[in-house]
Image (cartoon, rainbow, N blue to C red):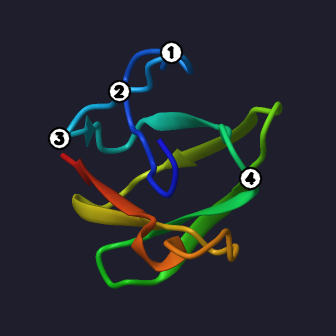
Amino acid sequence: MQYAFILSNDAINPESPQGETDVVLPLNELIEFRVTSLDVNHGFAIYDTNNQLIAQTQAMPGYVNRLRWKFTSPGKYNILCLEFCGMAHQGMRSSFTVK
């Protein structure tokens, strides 16, 4: 799936990438994001409930970056692509909730 972030609590099969629609993460626990790409380089940026950038890494084909973060405030967090990756770059966004 190009121009989309796929989030899941389980491993994602690159042959048939499917994520979860409502990802909920626990408050005050260390979370590890395993970030990769199936096509081109992407930026993986997490914004907090005040739309402030709090963490970022790169999504690169053939490589898995591990980003660890402890969320100390509940709410909805947004993920945006920070690397221009093609015509639909501006649509590369996702979100998750911390409770």
Name the mark nearer the viewer: 2 or 3. Answer: 2
Q: Amino acid at mark 4?
A: Val
Q: Amino acid at mark 1?
A: Asn
Q: Nearer the viewer, residue 82 or 97?
A: 82
Q: CA distance from mark 4 to mark 3?
A: 25 Å
Q: Residue 39: x, y in percent? A: 69, 45
Which residue is disc 2 drawn over?
18
Position above or below: 59 against 92: above
Name the mark nearer the viewer: 3 or 1. Answer: 1
Q: Amino acid at mark 3?
A: Asp
Crowd tier of the residue under label 3, counting other residues whose Cα lies within 10 Å: few below 14, some 14–19, many 20 or above: few
Q: Nearer the viewer, residue 94 or 18?
A: 18
N-terminal of the pair, mark 1 or mark 4, is 1
Q: Residue 90: x, y in percent? A: 47, 79
The quadrant holding residue 93 is: bottom left
Crowd tier of the residue under label 1, counting other residues whose Cα lies within 10 Å: few below 14, some 14–19, many 20 or above: few
Left or right side of 38 for 79:
left
User: Which element is circle 1 on?
Assistant: loop
Q: CA distance from mark 3 to mark 1?
A: 18 Å
User: Which element is circle 2 on?
Assistant: loop
Q: Which mark is residue 22?
A: 3
Position above or below: 69 against 90: above
Q: Are marks 1 and 2 in contact (CB under 8 Å)?
A: yes
Q: Residue furthest right?
A: 62
